[in-house]
């Protein structure tokens, strides 16, 4: 086996929480090189023996791990045949990387011998006692009588020492996996009482979301930001939440941050906020896009989509609509207006095939069909109408109980009016026994041109 231990960079001003996130993000990223990844203490341990050939050997893999690590980056790494040895070497070689792993167990023991005892986690509770015994290195610790070592310091220290030297099998915590759902919380260092401060704190969660989406090869359609009130403000309730939606899945969260700012501008906090959480409620697999060689190139329609989503926040989603085609050939039911932020994948709609021998549709369709008078078996509209084409029979909608005109049985014609031009008219179909051209129900439904 070959273990690689990595430790993330610690930027100036980083907190324990940000360091914990950096370690977890580095571990998630390392899953692309091996499924056997574990977080141990401050480091990420990766068992890479099964990946060496795939990535071109230990040196090539080492370089990829150092150069490709996500921000804040990888500070250093170490290679060793056992997990605890890799961790001990990583802790000791603080000034540079360890280029080669010990090839044999004897070489490993020789490499570990001069390391300080504090590089072994199991020895940390006993450092003062070991120092009084004059035991400062792992080599000196290993030379102590094993029976006395176990009786005085307990079996865990002896087991860890044997495991580091390859005398016992590696036992590690549960293997790391990339979570299926993004749901992260952030405890604020101090209470905030303005939405601007909430937005600044939420930016950290949005950056985490972007990292997670990148590793999942996905985009987000909807997120829910929740905030919990200070415990002293019980009368305000435990907290509140708001949902932010986009019309298309996005991975870069800059636009999501702008939408969140628009939403928060409409919110008045009921009490100081002490904790935030962000949940990705809807995600969708996002295919990769080829980069453009042209400067400032945007995907087609990107700027318009962003503008429409901002308007939806300011004016209300029900006031910014877009048309969609429905799989229905009944006039008046071929399309619908839906909020711009509603993703197409949730609509279950699509253009329907035109009925056989379909006539061209008019440019203008009346909101409600207009009844026509009939004289001498001929429909009238500013004079008698001449039927030029038809009939085109449209029948359906018997299942549609939501609309008054859901069930339709009509014969459509193109008619010519000397005064009004080309018109789109229809005659209601009635049972043959009741059919009478003098009382037939004719309607004007559209105008051509």
Image: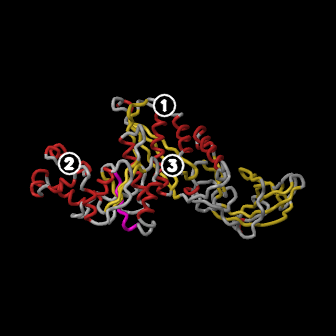
Which quarter of the image is occupied by the C terminus? bottom right
Residue behind mark 1 = 268
Label 2–label 3 contact, CB within 8 A: no
The quadrant where residue 79 appears: bottom left
Mark found first going from the N terminus, 2 or 3: 2
Q: Is residue 281 left or right of residue 297?
A: left
Rendered location of residue 13, percent (x, y): 41, 37
| Residue 46 within the segment the image draws in magenta | yes
The CA distance from mark 2 to mark 3 is: 55 Å
Rendered location of residue 151, percent (x, y): 9, 53
Q: Is residue 351 left or right of residue 219?
A: right
Q: How many residues crowd around disc 3 within 10 Å: few (fewer than 14), some, or many (20 or more)? A: many
Name the residue located 38 percent from the left edge and 44 percent from the top edge. Answer: 19
Q: How many residues crowd around disc 2 within 10 Å: few (fewer than 14), some, or many (20 or more)? A: some
Label 2–label 1 contact, CB within 8 A: no
Q: How many residues crowd around disc 1 within 10 Å: few (fewer than 14), some, or many (20 or more)? A: few
Q: Nearer the viewer, residue 42 or 411?
A: 42
| Residue 2 within the segment the image draws in magenta | no
Residue behind mark 2 = 136
Q: Nearer the viewer, residue 189 or 49?
A: 49
Residue farthest toward the right in the current orientation of the protein: 418
Name the residue located 47 percent from the left edge and 56 percent from the top edge. Answer: 215
Which quarter of the image is occupied by the N terminus? bottom left
């Amino acid at each position: 086996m070959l273990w690689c231990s990595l430790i993330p960079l610690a930027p100036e001003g980083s907190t324990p929480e940000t360091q914990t996130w950096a370690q977890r993000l580095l571990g998630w990223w390392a899953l692309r090189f091996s499924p056997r990844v574990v977080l141990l203490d401050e480091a990420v341990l990766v068992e890479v023996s099964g990946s060496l050939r795939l990535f071109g050997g230990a040196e090539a893999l080492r370089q990829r791990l150092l150069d490709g690590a996500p921000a804040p980056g990888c500070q250093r790494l170490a290679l060793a045949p056992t997990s605890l040895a890799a961790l001990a070497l990583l802790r000791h070689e603080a000034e540079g990387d360890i280029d080669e792993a010990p090839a044999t167990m004897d070489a490993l023991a020789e490499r570990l011998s001069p390391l300080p005892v504090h590089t072994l986690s199991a020895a940390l509770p006993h450092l003062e006692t070991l120092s009084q015994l004059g035991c400062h290195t792992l080599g000196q610790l290993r030379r102590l009588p094993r029976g006395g070592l176990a009786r005085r310091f307990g079996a865990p220290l002896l087991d860890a020492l044997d495991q580091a030297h390859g005398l016992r099998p590696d036992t590690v915590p549960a293997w790391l996996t990339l979570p299926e759902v993004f749901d992260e919380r952030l405890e604020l260092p101090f209470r905030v009482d303005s939405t601007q401060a909430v937005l600044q704190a939420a930016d950290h969660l949005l950056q985490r979301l972007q990292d997670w989406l990148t590793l999942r090869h996905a985009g987000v359609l909807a997120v829910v930001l929740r905030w919990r009130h200070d415990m002293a403000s019980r009368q305000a309730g435990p907290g509140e939440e708001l949902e932010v939606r986009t019309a298309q899945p996005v991975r870069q969260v800059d636009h999501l941050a702008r939408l969140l700012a628009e939403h928060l501008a409409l919110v008045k906090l009921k009490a100081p906020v002490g904790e935030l959480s962000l949940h990705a409620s809807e995600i969708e697999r996002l295919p990769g896009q080829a980069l453009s060689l042209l400067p400032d190139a945007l995907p087609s329609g990107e700027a318009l989509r962003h503008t429409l989503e901002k308007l939806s926040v300011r004016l209300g989603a029900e006031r910014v609509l877009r048309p969609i085609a429905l799989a229905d050939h009944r006039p008046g039911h071929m399309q619908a207006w839906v909020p711009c932020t509603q993703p197409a994948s949730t609509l279950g709609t699509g253009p329907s095939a035109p009925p056989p021998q379909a006539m061209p549709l008019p440019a203008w369709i009346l909101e409600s069909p207009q009844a026509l008078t009939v004289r001498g078996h001929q429909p009238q509209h500013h004079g008698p109408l001449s039927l030029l084409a038809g009939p085109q029979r449209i029948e359906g909608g018997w299942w549609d109980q939501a609309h008054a005109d859901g069930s339709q049985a009509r014969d459509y014609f193109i008619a010519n009016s000397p005064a009004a031009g080309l018109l789109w008219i229809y005659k209601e179909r009635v049972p043959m026994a009741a059919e009478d051209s003098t009382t037939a129900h004719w309607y004007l439904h559209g105008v051509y041109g």
